[in-house]
Every structure is written in structure tokens, then in C-alpha cells.
Image (tube, rainbow, N blue to C red):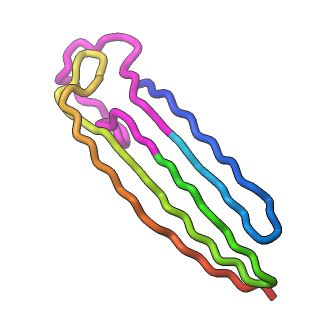
């Protein structure tokens, strides 16, 4: 199976506030050569993924020795079954997840 993926991150280096953004995507582009049958077994991790996306902006507040951070992470996945001879899924299901992460650090 072949896939294509890209990710990137950008962030600031402020003395009081720092902001950042992570984003990534991957997509299953199927097999290079057609399989003899769509019913062939395929072994691996995440072989039913059609595509994945993650976007995570974050903010860090710095005050003296204390840092407080927050990040919101959005993840979306599309997976399926009923594959064709190039192992491209036909019946696609989409699921999403959003979570908030917070941190506090005191350096001494």
C-alpha cells in the first residue's frame, strides 16, 4: 500500500506569549499494481484508513518562573471497507475527536 502524508509546525518565540500550530494529513493512495482480488488479505497497522487529519493550535503564557499552556487538538479520520483491486475503500465512515490539553510548569 502507498500513502502520501505531510505535516508542519510553526510557533512564535515571544517573552510573555507564545503561540503555535501543528497540522498534519495522510491519505491512502492504494496499491501501485492492482491486486488479483479485492478479497485478498492485507496485513499491517491502520490498513483500513482512507485519510487522517490533525490540527492543533496552542498558546503558552509566561510570567516569571511560571508557564501556563493550552492546546486544542482536532483529529479526523476516514476509514472504510469494501475495497477495490487497488485497495481503495468504498464505504467510508468519518469520525472526529476534539480535546483540550492544559499544562502548568514552575521552574526554579
Which quadrant of the structure image shows residue 74?
bottom left
Front residue of 76/2: it is: 76
Q: In the image, is residue 29 above or below residue 92?
A: above
* Quadrant of the snapshot with the C terminus: bottom right
**Which corner quadrant of the image does residue 52 belong to?**
top left
Pinpoint residue 100: horizontal percent, then vertical percent.
46, 67
Name the side, left or right, on which 16 lies relative to 85: right
Q: Is residue 85 above or below residue 83?
A: above
Q: Nearer the viewer, residue 27 or 43?
A: 27
The one nearer the camera, 43 or 88, is 88
Residue occupying the point 79% across, 84% down: 65
The residue located at (46%, 35%) in the rendering is: 26
Q: Of helix, strand and loop, which mostly describes the magenta segment?
A: loop
- What residue is shown at x 37% (from left), y 46% (from top)? 76
Which quadrant of the figure contains the N terminus?
Answer: top left
Residue depicted at x 36% and y 21%: 30
Task: Confirm whether the magenta stretch covers residue 30.
Answer: yes
Where does the magenta region start and end? 25-53
Q: From the viewer's perspective, is 86 left or right of 62? A: left
Residue 105's image quarter?
Answer: bottom right
From this view, report whether residue 95 is shown above or below residue 28: below
Residue 75 lies within the magenta run: no
Amino acid at each position: 500500500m502507498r500513502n502520501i502524508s505531510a505535516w508542519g509546525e510553526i510557533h512564535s518565540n515571544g517573552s510573555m506569549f507564545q503561540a503555535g500550530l501543528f497540522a498534519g494529513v495522510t491519505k491512502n493512495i492504494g496499491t501501485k499494481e492492482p491486486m488479483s482480488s479485492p478479497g485478498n488479505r492485507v496485513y499491517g497497522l491502520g490498513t483500513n484508513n482512507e485519510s487522517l487529519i490533525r490540527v492543533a493550535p496552542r498558546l503558552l503564557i509566561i510570567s516569571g518562573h511560571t508557564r501556563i499552556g493550552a492546546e486544542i487538538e482536532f483529529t479526523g479520520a476516514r476509514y472504510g471497507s469494501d475495497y477495490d483491486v487497488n485497495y481503495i475503500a468504498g464505504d467510508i465512515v468519518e469520525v472526529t475527536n476534539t480535546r483540550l490539553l492544559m499544562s502548568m510548569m514552575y521552574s526554579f
